[in-house]
Image (cartoon, rainbow, N blue to C red):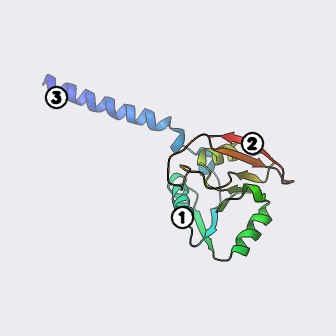
Amino acid sequence: MKKVYFIVIGIITIFLVVILLSKNSSASNFENINAMTGDIEIYKSLTCGCCSVYSSYVDSKVSPKVKSIDLQDIDKINQLKTQYGVPKELESCHTMIVGDYFIEGHIPLEAVEKLIKEHPNIAGIAMPGMPSGSPGMPGSKSGSFVIFAVNNDGTYSEFMRI
């Protein structure tokens, strides 16, 4: 009987620890993104595999509907980036539209959550290139991911590091 008692107490303890850890996990708790109305749109090349992996990453972490929009024509992709004001030097392989903001590149959702929460008067955020270990990209992370805030006039400065 004593052995059963300790097993039951052990199971309850493990269950409570798992619940407490999952409640405090910022990686799965994107309150501001999940409170948004409307869809999240990801504009990407039809042939880009990492863009599809990034779309799956976003779709698996948040509740708004994620719409992946494949663009076959490079001119349409460039027009979209120009339309939203993505500076050439900050471009990556896909552009995500979240509310009134653009999200350029393989940006972790923690940065998008901060953007939605703080709601700054900017055009969007960008992480240029395709950094190893970033969401959607293979390999190990080496160093910080530097994410830039792009102002409405096209100038930019550091938004955050992850």
* Residue 20 image point, x, y percent: 44, 33
Q: Which is closer to the viewer, label 1 or label 3?
A: 1
Identify the amino acid type marked 1.
Ser
Q: Earlier in the sequence, mark 1 or mark 3?
A: 3
Residue drawn at x 84%, y 54% as measured from the top left: 154
Categorize mark 2 by other alpha carbons within 10 Å: few (<14), some (14-19), many (20+).
few
Query: Residues under labels 1 and 3: Cα distance?
Result: 49 Å
As helix, strand or loop, the secondary structure at mark 2 comes to strand
Q: Is residue 7 left or right of residue 40?
A: left
Q: Which is closer to the viewer, label 2 or label 3?
A: 2
Quadrant location of the N terminus in the rendered image = top left
Query: Residues under labels 1 and 2: Cα distance?
Result: 27 Å
Question: Which residue occupies the foreground of this view, 29 or 27?
Answer: 27
Asked if the residues shown at circle 1 and circle 2 are in contact, with their CB atoms under 8 angstroms apart, the answer is: no
Residue farthest to the right? 153
Decide if residue 44 is in sight here.
yes
Residue farthest to the left? 1
Q: Which residue is mark 2?
A: 158
Q: Earlier in the sequence, mark 2 or mark 3?
A: 3
* Residue 134 image point, x, y percent: 56, 50
Residue drawn at x 62%, y 40% as measured from the top left: 144
Asked if the residues shown at circle 1 and circle 3 are in contact, with their CB atoms under 8 angstroms apart, the answer is: no
Identify the amino acid type marked 3.
Val
Q: Which residue is mark 1?
A: 52
User: Which quadrant would residue 117 be assigned to in this image?
Assistant: top right
Categorize mark 1 by other alpha carbons within 10 Å: few (<14), some (14-19), many (20+).
some
Above or below for 14 versus 117: above
User: Which quadrant would residue 157 be assigned to in this image?
Assistant: top right
Instruction: Indicate which disc residue 4 carries.
Output: 3
Residue farthest to the top? 2
Q: Is residue 9 left or right of residue 4?
A: right
